[in-house]
């Protein structure tokens, strides 16, 4: 089969499209014929060794995918050949999804909603489980609260906007352009703020009559945390999902104490494989009801993984997906 692998760490140039042996499922595993694989920032981090993983090169990249179960190993229940599924969580201690076939633990398999394509289903995994985990498990977002999504044009941000809207929250979102703002409002945001031209804290205060927001979903916490304390209500919650450009975060104690701030950090991987699949089962219900839908911004052939990684580093909207 064909796969996209790295033999050393580095930039997009280390991605190699090559032939590898097709794997066979062992106990508790399912072999999935990949129809689409999403490109995520974690893939870039793994490629550059910014996120060290147990499996060292040579290795196949890719966390998320969608496809058809080809075979199952012993001791597998609930998953059978011919099932259409999607998944997340590969490429860390295992080979990844940038391939024509991928091995997954059977508990990672989530039924693909019939009303979305394989490309869309591939975009559900990491983005929606991360957004759900941050909003629901960590922040306990309640109906009627106001949430600010920082960086709503990406996969996790666009998922968070939709999920917060589906939970009857008021949604504010920062974007990179007027065009992105229009798209994000179509996803359910009540108002958007162009962070390149507007004073974000001032706009948040204006849009909330000076009160601030109850929850901030923060995708670049090392850059934004200091300003976030000035945008939350007393007792507000800031959920750090993405680290941002710096490896450390400094908390200004005065502003944090002044508003009884709660700073939370969130990684959906802490839910475990079965827990993430359970979260995605909740997301599937919303997808089937028409409440949320993955946003696919670009679809490229698997052989163009380098171009996909370059596109991810540039301005883009929605998920980037590779198709074998």
Image (cartoon, grey):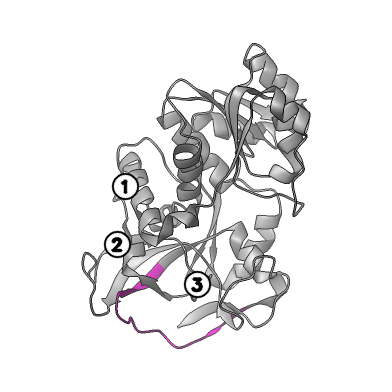
Residue in the image at 41% along x and 38% along y = 292
Specify whether residue 230 is in view.
no
Which numbered disc, 2 or 1, marks the residue that appears first in the sequence? 2
Which numbered disc, 3 or 1, marks the residue that appears first in the sequence? 3
Q: Is residue 134 left or right of residue 213?
A: left
Which numbered disc, 3 or 2, marks the residue that appears first in the sequence? 2
Image x and y of residue 191, in percent: 59, 23
Q: Which residue is mark 1?
A: 115
- The quarter of the rendered structure image containing the N terminus is bottom left
Evaluate if marks 2 and 1 touch, with contact meaning CB atoms under 8 Å apart. Answer: no
Q: Which residues are magenta?
A: 16-34
Cα distance in 3D space between marks 2 and 1: 12 Å
Q: Which secondary structure lies at badge 1? A: loop
Q: Is residue 161 left or right of residue 238?
A: left
Q: Nearer the observer, disc 2 or disc 1?
A: 2
Q: Which residue is mark 3?
A: 96
Q: Which residue is mark 2?
A: 84
Q: Nearer the viewer, residue 21 or 252?
A: 252
Cα distance in 3D space between marks 3 and 2: 18 Å
Q: Which mark is residue 257?
A: none
Residue in the image at 55% along x and 47% along y = 266
Evaluate if marks 3 and 1 touch, with contact meaning CB atoms under 8 Å apart. Answer: no
Image x and y of residue 118, in percent: 39, 58
Evaluate if marks 3 and 2 touch, with contact meaning CB atoms under 8 Å apart. Answer: no
Mark 1, Cα crowd under 10 Å, few <14 / some 14-19 / many 20+, is few
Quadrant of residue 257 within the rendered picture = top right
Residue in the image at 24% along x and 80% along y = 74
Quadrant of residue 251 within the rendered picture = top right
Q: Nearer the viewer, residue 164 or 276?
A: 276
Judge whether 304 appears above or below 273 on screen.
below
């Amino acid at each position: 089969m064909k796969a996209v692998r790295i033999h050393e760490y580095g930039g997009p140039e280390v991605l190699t499209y090559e032939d590898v042996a097709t794997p066979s499922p062992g106990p508790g595993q399912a072999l999935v014929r990949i129809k689409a694989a999403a490109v995520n920032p974690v893939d870039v981090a793994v490629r550059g060794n910014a996120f060290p993983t147990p499996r060292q090169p040579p290795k196949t990249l890719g966390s998320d995918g969608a496809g058809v179960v080809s075979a199952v190993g012993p001791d597998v229940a609930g998953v059978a050949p011919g099932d259409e599924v999607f998944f997340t969580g590969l490429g860390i201690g295992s080979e990844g999804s940038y391939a024509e076939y991928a091995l997954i633990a059977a508990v990672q398999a989530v039924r693909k909603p019939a009303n979305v394509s394989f490309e869309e289903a591939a975009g559900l995994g990491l983005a929606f489980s991360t957004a759900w985990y941050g909003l629901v498990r960590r922040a306990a977002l309640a109906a009627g609260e106001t949430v600010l999504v920082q960086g709503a044009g990406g996969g996790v941000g666009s998922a968070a906007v939709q999920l917060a809207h589906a939970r009857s929250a008021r949604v504010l979102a920062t974007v990179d352009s007027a065009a992105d703002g229009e798209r994000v409002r179509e996803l359910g945001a009540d108002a958007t703020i162009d962070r390149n031209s507007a004073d974000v804290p001032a706009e948040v205060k204006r849009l909330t009559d000076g009160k601030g927001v109850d929850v901030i979903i923060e995708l670049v916490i090392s850059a934004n945390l200091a300003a976030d304390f000035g945008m939350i209500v007393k007792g507000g919650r800031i959920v750090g999902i993405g680290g941002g450009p710096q490896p450390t975060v400094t908390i200004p104690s005065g502003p944090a104490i002044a508003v009884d701030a709660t700073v939370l950090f969130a990684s959906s991987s802490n839910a475990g494989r079965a827990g993430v699949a359970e979260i995605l089962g909740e997301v599937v219900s919303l997808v089937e009801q028409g409440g949320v839908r993955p946003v696919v911004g670009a679809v490229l052939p698997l052989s163009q993984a380098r171009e996909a990684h370059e596109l991810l580093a540039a301005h883009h909207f929605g998920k980037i997906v590779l198709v074998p």
